[in-house]
Amino acid sequence: MANAIRIVLMLLGLMVALFGAGVDFLLPGASPGLNLPQLLIILAGLGISVFAYNLRRPQFRRRLNAGSRRSIIAAALVTIVTLLALELLLTVSGISVYFGRDVANPDFDVARTTFCDGAGCRWIYDVVRDLCARGQQSGRRCIFNGQGYADDEEFIAGADFAGRTRILALGDSFAHGFSAEVGKSYVETIEARYPDAVVWNAGFSGTATNQAVTSFELLAPILEPDLTILGFYWNDFVDNLLPITSRYEAVDRLGRLVYVRPYRFDAWGNLVPIDEAAARYFADHRVYPPANEIERLLGSARLGTLALRLRDNIAEIGKAERRLAKGIEVTRGYLRQLRDLALSQDSALLVVLIPGMRELSGESERYDIAVALMEELALPYMPLKDIMIVEEDYAPPPDGHWSNAGHQKVGALLSDCIQLFIASGSLGDCEHVVTR
């Protein structure tokens, strides 16, 4: 029994030392290396291991037994002082706790500004109109029609549609026009270049390809578009795993914008619903509320926070790859569905492949997967990875969207392609579009 206790203590000490060596990777903005908190944790772990190793020596055990009470008290005091010192150093280092101060009350007041249903996500007209009137929202967030779409034109059929080029734009925040001034997004650039065309922008921030399919099903029979343009960004692979009704945008009591998702992925990558209070807590704190009192106590201390973050990192091992594989398969189905729907409506479909900053810096795995999907499904697409320039075309980090210049560059390229499409009825005449 004593031998087993000794082995367990040695392993425990080694685990604490290894945790100290690797904890640097858990700290915000940290880089590989050793700092004072890490050294203390490593020394504490090695101390436990050395103590356990010495238990095998009879004379050490005799001395320990002779002064066992004093030894236990001294060990307890050293442990407490070490833990307090580590907690203080982590506090001074600026490490935030895992759970916020209001963990006991995970609910907070929000005013929903969007709603999502079987027809996709839109603005809640009266709520957003009131926020704009009070100055709590402005700019692009205050441009929407009576149906809640991010377009100043009502989506209703016009008597003159038959004689005009009709274009339907679909996508997420890039199509919506985020980070561009009003009038300078890529969809608005197309509208300015072709004032006689009918251009409906059904792009909506935070949505994915599943919303594009739903929006096309709803709007294409009304508009009867000659051309449908889909803006595709790499995060669609994961977002397509979520139902359209899985998110809403809101403004909290301090006027901050929050995104609430009443779903989460479990440890096996399955999508599970969560209650509204937990979803709102995550939107406010970026972690889910504690599952029990022990987790709450751990997450209220800096040392416990590092342990919980380590647990999260271990749980994430392999999960991203499994989720991506599942997302690719689901996205393939949505793209195929949109392609077939466009064909049934006699609408040409063009996919704009949007690179993020990291794709332009070499991390292009998901962008390359998107290219492969376009080739597989024989979808005409405009690859922008070799055209966009981070310093010229993107808003400063952490934004990640195109700046005015980026939007207008893409808008000009699309406009040139549209001119050729109007003349010939083929997207293949545009040098920036890849067709099969």
Image: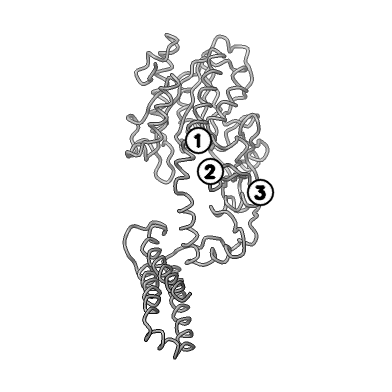
Label 2: which residue? 269
**Residue situated furthest right in the rendering:** 126
Question: What's under tag 1, amino acid-wise?
Answer: Lys
Image location (x, y in percent) of residue 260 = 60, 45
Query: Which residue is at 57% across, 29% downward?
Result: 151
- On screen, residue 114 above or below 109: above
Q: Nearer the viewer, mark 3 or mark 1?
A: 1
Query: Which residue is at 45% across, 68% downward?
Result: 91
Mark 2 → mark 3, Cα distance in angstroms: 20 Å
Q: Decide: marks 3, 1 in contact (CB < 8 A)? A: no
Quarter-of-image position of residue 23: bottom left
Q: Decide if residue 436 is on the left or right side of residue 291.
A: left
Question: What's under tag 2, amino acid-wise?
Answer: Gly
- On screen, residue 144 above or below 293: above
Question: What's under tag 3, amino acid-wise?
Answer: Glu
Q: Decide: marks 2, 1 in contact (CB < 8 A)? A: yes
Mark 2 → mark 1, Cα distance in angstroms: 9 Å
Which structural element holds mark 1? helix
Label 1: which residue? 326
Mark 3 nearby-residue class (10 Å; few <14, some 14–19, many ≥20): some
Quadrant that contains the C terminus: top left
Q: Which of marks 2 and 3 is in front?
A: 2
Q: Decide if residue 139 is on the left or right side of residue 13.
A: right
Residue 370: mark: none
Which structural element holds mark 2? loop
Image location (x, y in percent) of residue 166 = 53, 16
Between residue 280 and residue 197, name the one nearer to us. Answer: 280
Query: Which residue is at 55% across, 55% downward?
Result: 285
Mark 2 nearby-residue class (10 Å; few <14, some 14–19, many ≥20): some
Label 3: which residue? 276
Image location (x, y in percent) of residue 145 = 62, 29
Going from N to C along the chain, the mark reached first, 2 or 1, is 2
